[in-house]
Every structure is written in structure tokens, then in C-alpha cells.
Amino acid sequence: MAEPTEDSFDPNDIIERFRLRAEAVRRRPLPPVEGEERRRFREQAALDYFDFALLADATATLEDGILTFTIDLRPRGEDANADDATGTA
């Protein structure tokens, strides 16, 4: 397999794969387990979904060989033009 280059590598492909993984986790049926094992499975599925969905909402950039995922953690509807993390413009 050839090494990807900035010209051939599309980081949005990674984001799409995370979106698909999040959906797969959401649709994954519970295995036939009970009690504590069932609880652990559900907790892990919730964590898996959160992780995959978080990255699926990222914006990716690839500059000078550095891949950066930017994830906006502000509540929906909050001013997207804020200058810093405190929300002050």
C-alpha cells in the first residue's frame, strides 16, 4: 500500500468512516448476556458511540503533513464567531 500524500489523502474520508462507525455502534444489538456483563457492554457501546460521533463532527485539515481535527464543543446555537473559548467576541 502506497503512503498517502497531501495530494492523495482526503481527511474527510476518515471523518466519514467515523460517522459510519458511530451508526454501526448505535444499531449494534445487545449480545445475549445478562447482569453485570450486559451493563458493561452497554457502557462501552455508549463510550464507543460518543467517541465515533465526536470525531464524525470534526473538521479536518492537512497542512504541511500535519493532520488536525477541529471539534467545536460549544453548545449548538452559540455564536460561531467568538474569538476565544470564553465566547467573548
Image: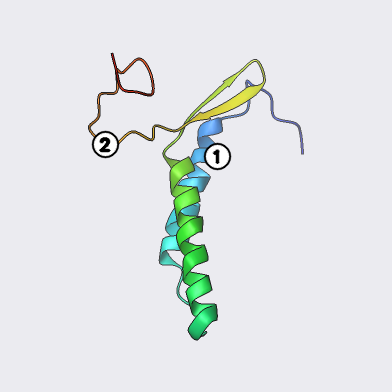
| Quadrant of the drawing holding the C terminus | top left
Residue under the point 56% across and 30% down: 10
On the image, which quarter does residue 71 sit in?
top left
Q: At label 1, which amino acid type do we have?
A: Ile
Q: Nearer the viewer, residue 80 or 32?
A: 80
Q: Looking at the picture, does residue 73 appear above or below residue 24?
A: above
Q: Position of residue 57 (x, y in %)?
A: 41, 39
Q: Looking at the picture, does residue 32 appear above or below residue 66?
A: below
Query: Can you identify the residue that label 2 sits on?
Result: 76
1 vs 2, front mark = 2
Q: Farthest residue to the left: give it.
A: 77
Q: Earlier in the sequence, mark 1 or mark 2?
A: 1
Work out whether residue 30 can be spotted: yes
Badge 1 marks a residue whose secondary structure is helix
Q: Is residue 14 left or right of residue 53?
A: right
Q: Position of residue 34 (x, y in %)?
A: 49, 86
Q: Looking at the picture, does residue 29 appear above or below residue 47?
A: below
Name the disc covering residue 45, or none: none
Work out whether residue 31 can be spotted: no
On the image, which quarter does residue 58 sit in?
top left
Q: Is residue 32 left or right of residue 83?
A: right
Q: How is the image coloured?
A: rainbow
Label 2 environment density (alpha carbons within 10 Å; few <14, some 14–19, many ≥20): few
Query: Can you identify the residue that label 1 sits on?
Result: 14
Badge 2 marks a residue whose secondary structure is loop
Residue under the point 26% across and 36% down: 76
Q: At label 2, which amino acid type do we have?
A: Arg
The span from disc 1 to disc 2 (Cα, nearest Å) is: 23 Å
Label 1 environment density (alpha carbons within 10 Å; few <14, some 14–19, many ≥20): some
Q: Looking at the picture, does residue 82 appear above or below residue 14?
A: above
Q: Nearer the viewer, residue 68 or 14?
A: 68
Residue under the point 52% across and 72% down: 41
